[in-house]
Image (cartoon, rainbow, N blue to C red):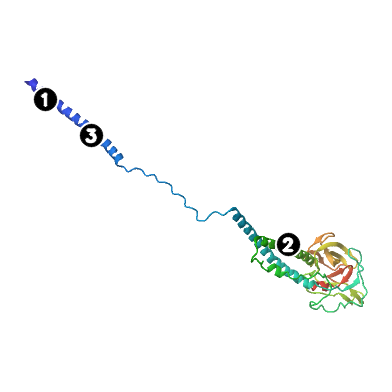
Amino acid sequence: MTFVIFFSRNLAGVGRSISRGFFFTSAIFLLFGMLVAGIWIGVKLSPPSVKVAPLAADPPLVSEPSAKEIALLQQIGTLSARLMRLEMDAKSLAQRMDAVNEFEARMSLDAVPLGPRAKTQPASAGGPLLKPEKTVPSASAPEGARDKQGKGGSAAAPIQSRRPLASEPLPTDGLSLANLEQSLGRLTVALHGLEQRAVKISAEHMAFPGRLPVASSRRGSGYGNRRDPFTFRMAFHSGIDFPAAKGTPIYASAGGVVVYSGPRKDYGQTVEIDHGAGLVTRYAHASKLIAKKGQIVMPGQQIAEVGSTGRSTGAHLHFEILKDGRFVNPKTYLNRF
């Protein structure tokens, strides 16, 4: 009896263990089945994928220019750039031509009154004690204001009708690009010609002895007959004196080539500059010479210092201008500046 009761208890425990194991196994299979079923349902119920086709490019609003149109645009751009450059060149040249016209108006002298032939020619030796001349003005006459009308100097032909050519706009109505290009070419040639003329006049301006050789407006003895300070007799004074303290800078009245630099009888320490066209300036009685023979000097460049060497009574610059070896009144040139 006891065995039966024990066996029955063991059988009941085994049955309960089998029931629990079966339950857990069934639960696992159920969950796995539900998971698989959920995946299958999701795949079946999901909407089909839609492939988005790329958008077609919008047709161009403006057609691309042809090769002929591109070439035409390039030609127009080139002509526009040339026209702008010519306009700037014309404005600059017009300003230069104004200065050239003003200079030529002042330089338009019929003839320079020539004095006696210099005993001491440029680049030679010696100094003058000249006899008084009957046909030259007295050196004691006061230096007046600038002459409104003078005679002498370079007789260059006046420049006419320059400003309108430089400033007038090009006529463009009805002109083809080819005609416009030809017009620009003619204008370029005309401006080049005026440029060459301006360069020539500028060179003449630089070689014109019209600048004061010392930075002072004070003048001593003038050109012409005067009473000699040593003999107290009437004698011809071949230049203009500029009294100044010893050591005062002496400047070239114009550009040129130094043809003499050294001592001269009566003149003392002297510099002579050849400006071309037969014009020579002489600077005498210097205390110190700076410019050397053969040197090219520019207008306003220092060439010496004021002194009292040679036949002189005190510190001053004796300034002469010679035209073809003959004295001319320096005032004729100095009054043009």
> Mark 2 against mark 3, which lies toward the viewer?
2
Q: With respect to residue 148, does 31 lie above or below? A: above
User: Label 2 belongs to which residue?
Assistant: 189
User: Label 1 belongs to which residue?
Assistant: 9
Point out residue 186 in the picture as x, y percentages from the top left corner: 71, 63
Query: What distance separates the C-alpha of mark 1 from that of mark 2?
Result: 134 Å
Q: Residue at x 12, y 26 (%)?
A: 12
Visible residue check, residue 179: yes
Point out residue 169 in the picture as x, y percentages from the top left corner: 66, 67
Point out residue 111 in the picture as x, y percentages from the top left corner: 85, 73
Quadrant of the image occupied by residue 172? bottom right
Amino acid type at mark 3:
Leu
Visible residue check, residue 299: no
Element type at mark 2? helix
> Mark 1 against mark 3, which lies toward the viewer?
3
Q: Residue at x 58, y 53 (%)?
A: 66
Element type at mark 3? helix
Q: Which mark is residue 30?
A: 3
